[in-house]
Image: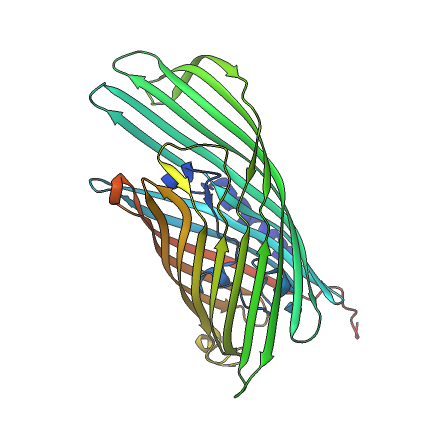
Amino acid sequence: MIKKIILVGLFLFSLQSIAQATSSPYSFYGIGEVKFKGTIENRSMGGLGILSDSIHINLQNPAALSSLKLTTFTAAGTFSPTVMKSSTVEERAQRTSLDYLAMAFPAGKLVFNLGLMPYSAVGYKILNVDYVNNEREISIGKGGLNNVFVGAGYHINPKLSVGAQMTYNFGEISHSFTFLKGTNQFNTRELNTSQLNGLSFNTGLTFSTKIANKLEFTSSATFSPEMRLNSTNSRNIAKTTFNSQGVEVVFGSSDIEIADTKIKTPSKVTFGAGVGKSKNWFLGIESAFLSKPNYDIVYPKATFESANKISLGGYFIPKYNSFNKYLEKVTYRGGFRHENTGLIVNSQSIKDTAFTLGLGLPLNGTFSNINIGCEFGKRGTKNAGLIQENYTNISIGLSFNDRWFQKRKFD
């Protein structure tokens, strides 16, 4: 077990050392690009969070934790090459990010979990050019919101489970705007920084029952009330120039006092249902509904609306207990999702659509596994002077299982 923990730690350290959470220009708005809150297993099925599993942690519905039979460690990261297209130009970007680190363990009738993951990310660099007035503006955004969470799931009876999770959210977001005019030697830079923190909660339930022909019906629901974030804000105005290597050099700066603010993120409700045969196959559908966010910032060309998402997905295992054919024990996953993100720019609702595929590769002689997922998606549009992002998310995760808190019968 110690070797497994060390391996996870080294894996996470390598991810964090090169992490760039997002490269989307749409992360300029609000608190940035809101990240997916589930595991690779969920993501590979179109984001489906219905399933309870005895050896995998479900990070979307805390009620599903109650099905875990073993202590489980899980961690994952994603590599995301993206092609960004407007009506006239095309640019490429890529990022590598940590998705989550989590642990769950059974303790009597309760199953507890704890972990950390990113909530949102800001990462963009945009150059706007006014050829008429010979002016340029360079906009750079960095940072994001992270969260640390603890939760528990409980089996009320063999069919019904409930769960709850509490999360502490924290992070820093900065937006800088550098104005360059003509051949002036010096530029003006405005740097706005926000320190964010606040608590959020998530509750859930799952219901499963046997139906005809050895099939099992599963349904789930979750509710997350709106999150209130405290935002401690600062602003700095500086005179800058760029050296021969293109690095910005600050010559003089002054701080300007600005008011602290409160941010309300949307409440969220999900409903899902599916049918399948245990350890063989499953097919389900899930819908999510988010209220309209309430941000104090007013954007000249952007507004917000309520958001929604629909996910379709499932898995197939040819023969989970095969002795001599490894490919028959592999879990094959697939899915589709379509999302209205709730962001409106230039009167265009920003939508996000993706197809997903994944593999669950068991490690022989253990309940542990390696999970690989691929997501092929499109966000935004080339209409109205906007950017369309064609992205590929390639994810890999490790899930280690062991037996804790159980007294050995034989030494």
Judge from the rendering whether residue 211 lies leftward or rightward of residue 70; answer left or right. Answer: left
Of residues 334 and 156, the one nearer the viewer is 156
Judge from the rendering whether residue 340 lies leftward or rightward of residue 160; answer left or right. Answer: left
How far from the left and from the top, in percent, is residue 268? 54, 53
Judge from the rendering whether residue 289 lies leftward or rightward of residue 181; answer left or right. Answer: right
Q: Residue at x 46, y 38 (%)?
A: 30
Vertical side of 305 occupied by 361: above or below: below
Q: Quadrant of the C terminus?
A: bottom right
Q: Quadrant of residue 68?
A: bottom right
Of residues 362 and 213, the one nearer the viewer is 213
How far from the left and from the top, in percent, is residue 62? 62, 60
Residue 118 visible in the snapshot: yes
Residue 24 visible in the snapshot: no
Vertical side of 327 occupied by 304: above or below: above
How far from the left and from the top, in percent, is residue 406? 76, 68
Q: Residue at x 50, y 33 (%)?
A: 296
Q: Quadrant of residue 394?
A: bottom left
How far from the left and from the top, in percent, is residue 384? 26, 41
Q: Residue at x 61, y 37 (%)?
A: 197
Q: Residue at x 35, y 47 (%)?
A: 349
Of residues 168 and 394, the one nearer the viewer is 168
